[in-house]
Image (cartoon, rainbow, N blue to C red):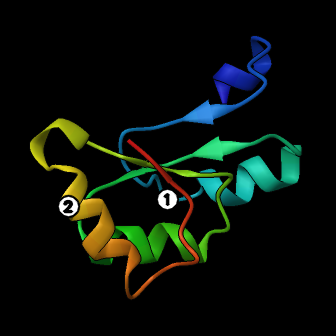
Amino acid sequence: MRAVDFGAQFLVSPVRVNGLPAFAHAAGIPFVPGALTTQELHRCDNDRPTVIKMFPASSVGPWYLAEVLAPMPQLSIMP
């Protein structure tokens, strides 16, 4: 990824990008994919991200995060 070539020390994306998790793990750098729906969050969690960015968090409220984390407490999510 070009960002790493230019010195990026972590990667953030508003969506899950195919190939990014494997690249980040191989490069030894943290990555933060974006997700909103439970299916997107689950797919991101399977990639072992540093944390998942809930995006766009402004479209939901704290109640949504609480409801998502109830059945999936292992998720590490930031708004």
Name the residue that disc number 2 marks: 63
Give the secondary structure at mark 2: helix
Residue 6 at x, y percent in the picture: 75, 11
Q: Amino acid at mark 1?
A: Asn
Give the residue at x 43% y 55%. 16
Q: Quadrant of the N terminus?
A: top right
Determine whether 56 is above or below 49 in the image: above
Determine whether 50 is above or below 3 in the image: below
Left or right side of 22 for 70: left
Question: Furthest-top residue in view?
Answer: 6
Give the residue at x 45% y 75%. 43
Label 1 Cα crowd, 10 Å radius (few <14 / some 14-19 / many 20+): few
Name the residue that disc number 1 marks: 18
Q: Which mark is residue 56?
A: none
Left or right side of 39 for 59: left
Q: Quadrant of the C terminus?
A: top left
Left or right side of 28 for 70: left
Left or right side of 68 for 4: right
Give the residue at x 14% y 50%. 60
Question: Furthest-left residue in view?
Answer: 59
